[in-house]
Amino acid sequence: MSTAKRGAAPPVVACARLTFADNTTNYIKDSSVILGRIHFGMPPFFVAVAATDRSVANQHAKLHWLRARARWAITALSEANMIVINDANVPAGETRELDALSRIKLGATTFYFSLPAAPSKDASTFTVAPTATAAATSAAAAADTDG
């Protein structure tokens, strides 16, 4: 017998999540993914962050888990398109560690990186209720547009 509330969305098993200004969410389920614009021949482990934003490269950045440091990081892959993390530019080829609710800007597309509140039993993934950090992410986005 299920203990989930009737009509409630089931939890998602993920490592992290990306939340966009329109409240769409991408759950990161792998320890390494490529972030970029939708294009033909997208590689495996690809997360589309923009459909038509030409300021986002096809393979703009790599989001990956740094096992030795137990931290998430992002590496800029595009020579022509900048990444901005919390208002700091990340030049091509460089890597920056991420914190919960880091604001990431690829081209003209801005989104938030967030971590689930509690790890699963095996500590390699997280079980996230669909709205677990939505309030915090929405508050951060609202504060960002107010400023």
Image (spheres, helix red, strand yellow):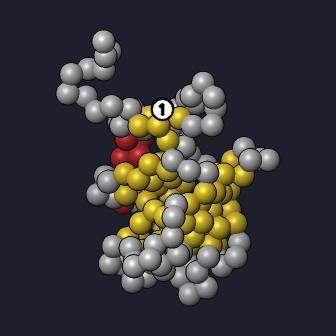
Extreme residue toward the top, this view: 1
User: Is 12 left, or right, of 7 in this rendering?
Assistant: right
Residue 31: x and y in percent read 61, 51
**Residue shown at 43% from the left, 60% from the top:** 111
Considering the image in quadrants, where does the C terminus appear? bottom left
Eyeballing the image, is 10 above or below 23? above
Eyeballing the image, is 92 above or below 145? below
Label 1 amino acid? Thr
- Asked whether residue 11 is in view, the answer is yes
Between 95 and 122, the residue placed more toward the observer is: 122
**Residue shown at 53% from the left, 82% from the top:** 81
Q: Which residue is tagged 1?
A: 127
Between 102 and 79, the residue placed more toward the observer is: 79
Categorize mark 1 by other alpha carbons within 10 Å: few (<14), some (14-19), many (20+). some
Between 103 and 19, the residue placed more toward the observer is: 19
**Residue shown at 66% from the left, 51% from the top:** 65
Extreme residue toward the bottom, this view: 80
Image quarter of residue 92: bottom right
Residue 116: x and y in percent read 51, 37
Extreme residue toward the left, this view: 7
Considering the image in quadrants, where does the N terminus appear? top left
**Residue shown at 33% from the left, 31% from the top:** 10
Residue 86: x and y in percent read 56, 61
Numbered-mark total: 1
Eyeballing the image, is 129 above or below 18? above
User: Is 65 left, or right, of 140 in this rendering?
Assistant: right
Q: Dot 1: what SS? A: strand
Residue 37: x and y in percent read 42, 74
- Asked whether residue 104 is in view, the answer is no
